[in-house]
Image (spheres, coloured by chain):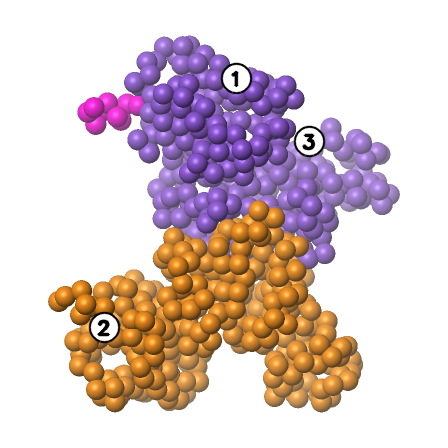
Chain colours: A purple, B orange
Amino acid sequence: MSISKLENKLAIGVDIGGTNIRVVIVNNKGKIINSLKVPTLAQQGKEATIKRIIETIHQIIIQSKISPDELSGIGIGAPGPLNGKTGIISFAPNLPGWKNVPLRKILEDEFRIKVILENDANAAAWGERSFGVARGINNLACFTLGTGIGGGIIIDGRIYHGADYGAGEFGHMTVNKDGPRCNCGKYGCLEAYSSATGIKNRLKDRIREGVQSRFLNLDKVRSVESISLRSIFEAAYQGDELVRNIVEEAIAYLGIAIANIANILNPQMVVLLGGISNEGERLLIPLREEIKKRTLDTHYRFLKVVLGELGDQAGVMGVAALTLNYL
Amino acid sequence: MSISKLENKLAIGVDIGGTNIRVVIVNNKGKIINSLKVPTLAQQGKEATIKRIIETIHQIIIQSKISPDELSGIGIGAPGPLNGKTGIISFAPNLPGWKNVPLRKILEDEFRIKVILENDANAAAWGERSFGVARGINNLACFTLGTGIGGGIIIDGRIYHGADYGAGEFGHMTVNKDGPRCNCGKYGCLEAYSSATGIKNRLKDRIREGVQSRFLNLDKVRSVESISLRSIFEAAYQGDELVRNIVEEAIAYLGIAIANIANILNPQMVVLLGGISNEGERLLIPLREEIKKRTLDTHYRFLKVVLGELGDQAGVMGVAALTLNYL
């Protein structure tokens, strides 16, 4: 196979979310050639979901009129914990019934092609490094801010998995010894303050305390679920007493967590994706102030804190990129 | 040169402290063949200290009756920030006047032998991995608990320096957003709670508040300086109201910091050296409880938290080991 042939390869990226399965075809320049999204229907069980994954991959190959030898491989991004070496998903918090699923082998048997399995936050970090804001950066950390908070670490140009495939649990750093309960069952985690869930839970706490909102229709705890992060930030910037402290706290604790990463790992760049990172400069300005307050000067001067460029495509592009690089 | 010849090499390790310069000769089994200690006399200036370092190395070579070709090299451990690649000490907090000192070149010119410069906490981690409790462990973090708190990270069997030689500043993790001022000028750092200085500063705070000690002669703020960490812990275990909370807080925040490292880096082992680690099991039992409370279960089950075996020789043995490995 000639080098130019290799350079023209395409890769399939698959993101297995709790709600949707997303499948894309990416070329080696990071251009998405085709993309499909189908509901995961996780409640129909593991076998049904795996069948839908396989069918959707077949479908995108047929739709895109590509022959198998144009493909470098299939990359799968899934929420951890999973073991990239064995290709087994130990379990998936948002996919009931998934326990020790040898997904890599299942897909390799079906498609007779290289399959790579990667944690979704690591995949997002790799996506930004391959095709996004972190091109050419060899040492970086990526925060995926969503319902939960994940993390991906790249050291010397490679994903760092830790000694037992567990590295990068940024969301479960303790940022406040006496903080509120997190989804993980522990207390005072970053995720309990700065994830979408954390922010909404803090809002509910305050509504229970009887605090009133000036701008939002938040008379009941139940009404918090339907409100968007965007509206919450908007109200905070307009000076709404109820939400302002919560938003400030979310930013302060995220700043502390990033500063801790900077002091510990001394990366060149921290990339933010999802959730409150969609607030852009309104987030970045106070966030950088907090990080500066908390990071050794030598480390802060060296550090870039930036928003990702790939949005919610970062993960799926990252796993696709992994198969292109690992040929 | 035959392999057996290489295997019989000796290495010189030098530790440049604010008070003493320590020089040892170590064989490749980690046995200290000879050791010298001279006062640093930092106040006499940079040139004088460098001269003393050179003289002491000459002296130990002569005393030990070894010929230059038996030596693999000279390893220098110094407090950061320093750049192991260029061999330059940027500055040294406990050595006034040291700014951009090309110590590696100075010693290479003098001794015509390989010289390696390493941050003292990284050196301690490497010492424990080469000759101490962490032999055979490829992913570990080491906390050096002393006047300050340093950290060394080993990833995939190599010291991790970070992108700008600044990795491992465990002492400056923020553990309490609203915590007291640290020596670094920032607030709520681990070092402000769990270092010897931190514990003593917290004691002073409480004495200023008028709290009385039952067991310690601590009527004045000034009297805190002369008291040992051992006496402070002893009084805490006997139920002294003044110190108990401070010791508990020191342990709790150290536990949080270790848990954060575990969640972020997922190492096999965390090694503790110096300061409160000399309390042994009395420290480890409550500390492990705190770490368990703060670490994801998967990560905690995988993690060993242990005391170092080399004590205050860890650093000097680590730099010696570096020259033996890098032949």
- How much space separates mark 3 and mark 2, taking CA atoms? 66 Å
Residue for badge 3 = A228
Q: Given the image, what chain letter belongs to the residue carrying mark 2?
A: B
Residue drawn where x is 49% and y is 14% of the image: A55
Magenta run includes residue B97: no
Asked whether residue B80 appears in the rendered view, the answer is no
The residue under label 1 is A51
* The magenta segment: A1-10
The disc placed on residue B9 is: 2
Q: SS of the residue at dot 3?
A: loop
**Does the segment drawn in magenta span residue A4?**
yes
Q: Nearer the viewer, residue A258 or A53?
A: A53
Sequence order check: which comes first, mark 3 or mark 1? 1
Q: Which quadrant holds the C terminus of chain A?
A: top left
Tag 2, which secondary structure? Answer: loop
Tell which of A286 and B217 is nearer to you: B217
Label 2 near label 3: C-beta < 8 Å? no
Residue A152: x and y in percent read 48, 43
> What is the quadrant of the N terminus of chain A in the image?
top left
Residue A63: quarter of image: top left
Q: Between label 3 and label 1, give the one nearer the viewer.
A: 1
Kind of residue sitting beneath label 2: Lys
